[in-house]
Image (tube, helix red, strand yellow):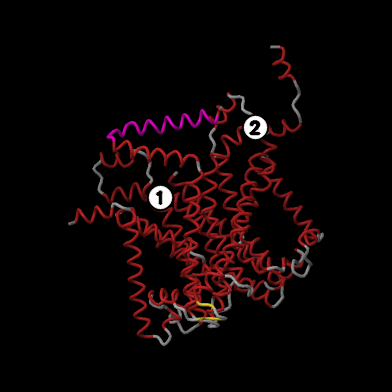
Amino acid sequence: MVKKVNKIFDHKWASTLLWIIAIIIVWEIAACIVAATKRTPENILPHLYQIVAAIFSPKEVSSGMTAIMIVLTSARATILRSLLGFLLGIAAGFLLALIMKMSGLLEKMLFPYLMLIQLIPVLGLAPIVLSITGDINKSRIIIAAILSFYPVATNTLAGFKSVSRDKYDLMYTYAAKKRTIYTKVLIPSAIPYFFTGTKIAAPMAITASILVDTLQGDGGLGCMLSQSLKHAMSIYVFWLIVFFSAFIGILSTHLMSWIEALISPEKRVIRKAKREDRKMKAAKAPEAAKDYVYDRRARMCSKRRS
Amino acid sequence: MAQTTQKIKRPKTLYQRFKENSKAQSAATIVMPVLLGVVIVILWQSQALHHLLRTNTFTLPLLTRIGEIFGENLDKIWDNSVATMTVAFVGLLIGSLLGYGVAIFAALCPRVGKGGLTVIGAFASIPVVALAPVMNNWTKDVSDVASVRSMVAKILVVMLIAAANMCLNAYRGLTELKPYAMDLMDTYAAKKRTVFVKLQLPNSVPYIFTALKVSVPSSIITAIVSEYFAEYIIGVGRQIRENIVLAQYPTAWAYIAAACLLGVAAYVVLMIAQSILLRRYH
């Protein structure tokens, strides 16, 4: 029996599931206590099934829209804006890291400021940016861009710097041009670092977008959040938004990992090798799979060179 | 041969000389950022920045004016800064300890603990904006005094964010040991407790600072954002917002300057602590 239980826990998802169930149980116990003692339990801690029921309830909450319709339409606005800011931010971050790598003088000039931006509470600047631009959409995009800009810039720069001396030496023996060094060595080796940056940046961009929403009424998740907190509409809209924004925050990080797995060449090779490995295992020849990885890498390198 | 000697003899350009001179390089590390700072200050004071951003001195006051206001409201700014820093620091402290505890649990019994890491790591991606109002609701009964209960709510939000950060890094510190270190412990027949105290705990110290480097600025930012939603009006972040609502832009800018100073000061303190503590081990 113990062995069987242990075997289940060998899978990573099993213990994750256990923790999620534990959290749900704690939540429900607390919800029962709150329901028994408070006058308006749904304001403090509704049962999870009540929140789920709110997703499917056909009752109109405000201006002919059901709760889930409100959440989804405002989420679309929020996500689109944060996505635009995020894309601008990571593009700017990558370019800045590249420029800083190219010119040592510029790096010296800008690096302390890059560190400084990290320490400035940019979200605190949201109201000021709003009053400077005067346009809520613009300020949302700008804040999301600034927030996603610096993790990407610092991480990508660290990636450029992580390239070891012998790789430069190898390129030197090939008499490679500067451009070739950048496209074949520096940028590919900075890509994992770049994605580490985007994984930090993605939830930040969403947070920024939601926060700027709360400053002014113009649709968006944050706006609906503050409205339902003021009881302008059903409180379940608030709970739906809380869960939904937590969900997209977590999803955004995972999305970045998926994109990384999709484009980064190293992961692609590893994945292919794993697939081959499974096939080989079926043929009872696991050693060959290992060779395959090296073989395949060597071939990739030679292809790049040619 | 003649060609190479010619190449060596060719006089270096000024740029090359500058690049190879280590003294000039280290001087540039200080001079260049200062230069950029001076340029920004000049642009700001001469209102060129205002033209660039198409704004006026009312929304983006001159630096001298911000400094003036900062000096005038020093007492109030100090009170609000203390409130923000208490929230950030207490939340960071409790959260980091909690995160470290979970990391130890996960390192000691990885089968069950690893899932906990995933779940707590997910908390790091939850927007603060979603957490803050929930915490406000939950802490309604903590105290009858509005200032205390909104403080508790803010601390809880900061705590969750800091715990998520610390737990992931500390787990790596406890498990990613130097190669063969574990084998060495095995040959000594060391007890699990000894391995933990002598090997895993010291190994995790640099990772703790890696976590703190991220979570110190983020706990201040979190404290500032959760002030927006708090019941009781206090704190640097809340004052920024309140003053903008009242169209008191210079005052708001003074609070922004205070927030920046807090962030920088906390980071400097962390760096000093790191240099003192890590010297003992490494």
Q: Work out whether residue A146 or residue B74 is closer to the camera in this orientation and state it.
A: A146
Which x, y percent locates residue B65?
76, 67
Tag 1: amino acid: Arg
Quadrant of the image occupied by residue A178 = top right
Which x, y percent locates residue B177?
37, 44
Q: What quarter of the picture does the C terminus of chain A occupy?
A: top right
**SS class, disc 1:** helix
Q: Which residues are magenta?
A: A283-304
* Mark 1 nearby-residue class (10 Å; few <14, some 14–19, many ≥20): some
Which x, y percent locates residue A54?
44, 76
Residue B188 as seen in the image, left or right of residue A47: left
> In the rendered image, is residue B179 in sight?
yes
Q: Is residue A303 magenta?
A: yes
Q: Residue at x 39, y 47 (%)?
A: B203
* A32 over B178 or under it: above or below: below
Q: Badge 2 is on which residue?
A: A178
Q: Is residue B29 magenta?
A: no
Q: Badge 1 is on which residue?
A: B172
**SS class, disc 2:** helix
Q: Chain of mark 2?
A: A
Which x, y percent locates residue B81?
59, 69
Tag 2: amino acid: Lys
* B17 over A131 or under it: above or below: above
